[in-house]
Image (cartoon, grey):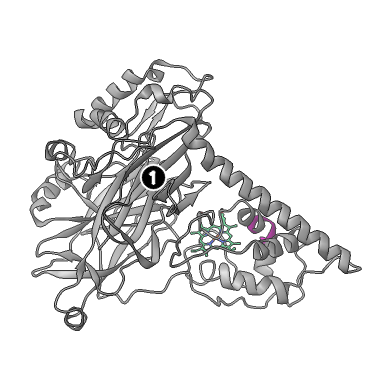
Amino acid sequence: MSRPARSWPLPAQFLATAGAFLLGALIFAACGGATSDDATPAVAGTTEEAEDAAEGGNEEAGSVTETSAAPTEISFANDVQPVIEANCVSCHSGSGPGTTHLTMETAGSFADVAEFASFRIEDGQMPPWPLTGLHEVSYKYDLSMTDQEKATVIEWARSGAVLDVDAGTELTATAQAFPPIDADAVLYPDVPYEGSDKLDDYRCRVIDPELDEQKYVTALEIRPDETRVLHHALIFRAEADQRSVATQEVAADGQPGWNCQALPGLGGGTLEQIGSWAPGNGPVNLPEGSGLQMEAGDFFVIQWHYHYDGEAFPDNSGLAVEYASDEVIAAAGGSLDPVRNIILLGPVEIPCASFESGPLCDRDAAVARLATEFGTTAALIPEFINRECGVTPADFSQFTDGIASSSCEMDAPVGDVISIWPHLHELGTTYRLTLNPGTPDERVLIDIDKWNFEWQIAYYLDEPLEFTANDRLLLECGWDRALWPAGAESRYVVWAEGTQDEMCYNGIALR
Ligand code: HEC
């Protein structure tokens, strides 16, 4: 693949018009493309891996039966209990984030749900750590289990979930999924949200830290209230001069806050995303010596995504904030390294499959819809991303079976990477971010082969990873139209902010 000249920063003109939609700094480079060649290695790689793992597992099982006369008995006390106490119990007991769904407080309560739990382990959804393991960097809060640990719990569950301890034996977490933050304040919107009659309600609310001087935020944590309806939250930083626009938005429909779509802007200005949360996600915890700089008057906007299956329970979730103390700032030499959030985008061109039809399967009609739905700028974004990534819609016309993918290669933003936030919507299936693709220094940073919209996780590097001036990034995204909601009108899907539209998006926090 040729290495085109650097093509960022973007023309200021585009940023000015697209600011409301494309938050913060955008970087691209022309190149890459969305040929099936690009997509194939990602899929083939992961399939082989899975097969290797499966073969390895069988061999191991084989050798065990050969050497021992009777099949090995898995003991709950010796084999299963330590695994679940280290990997599940901190979230699924006490007031943990998984408790409204399933509690594992005693051996008996785990045995009762053993089969269900083993399914979720087997399909990779629990513990909530969607990375496949192909990444070549190490992340904090790694919740993954080894193949051996998974196999132990699954086999024990399949062979009858027999307890060799008293059913009342308490399970005690031996590891915490996330260390708590040392909050200086817990802030709430001005009034709780009473809910609405929508199925999915995206509500933006101002959370005001009432800063009268500059401060550095070093950690942030959503404090969820009503997890029966709160689905996820995105945290944004807004500047003091965006306050009057926020006030107008708030007044618009008479309800607290305002209706806002997948990634909100604020009346023509940009909002910088600084964090995300879904039940079970950890805090934003910045490495020592760095902080999010907030000026006097700056404030937070949180987009709360409520999903009302039945009753719309009221919610009063808040945001815990930790600020750098004077001592911390002095120790860092008088100021902290400010954290920047950069956005990388890839193309989204997902044609209707050959078994779908309808007026919106026409791409022009689908793009025209964006203008009506989200405004004229929204309808320009797909073209803009395609141009920057060197592709045209024709490059995607071979996707006739509902499976689609895209990729874009670009210059890496220069700095020390703190965290990486992958983002697709509900049709998303695969996601990969690779540093210096096709070179001897190639390193996979993120690899997900079963995207789950429920889990909006930011991955925090163990050690900040340095991106230098000549580094390149390859962003690859995959979708499956089989995930299109049943009964909804088919349409050609392009890049836009609605949940039924799609994104191929990466947020990187650097210092
Ligand atoms: C970081 C916190 C966390 C950890 C660790 C965790 N879970 Fe969960 N779990 C959750 C949350 C939150 C939910 C509800 C959201 C969902 O289903 O994705 C959940 C849901 C589940 C469900 C589905 C419940 C339902 O009603 O659909 C099962 C089963 C489950 N977890 C089992 C496990 C097992 C087994 C482990 C350990 C191998 C584990 N979990 C580890 C947070 C966690």
User: 227 or 255: which is nearer to us?
Assistant: 227
Q: What percent of the width, then of the height, locates residue 441?
A: 42, 55
Quadrant of image for the N terminus: top left
Q: Which residue: 29% across, 41% down?
A: 261
* Residue 53 lies in quadrant: bottom right
Q: What percent of the width, then of the height, locates residue 190?
A: 20, 59
Query: Whereabouts is ligand 1, in terms of quadrant?
Result: bottom right
- Could you say whether the residue bearing mark 1 is in a helix, strand or loop? strand
* In the image, residue 309 lies in the stretch drawn in magenta: no
Query: On the picture, is 307 further left or further right than 62?
Result: left
Which residue carries the number 1 mark? 474
Q: Is residue 480 visible?
A: no
Q: What percent of the width, then of the height, locates residue 457?
A: 41, 56
The magenta segment: 113-117
Amino acid marked by disc 1: Leu
Q: Main secondary structure of the magenta part?
A: helix
User: 34 or 203: which is nearer to us?
Assistant: 34
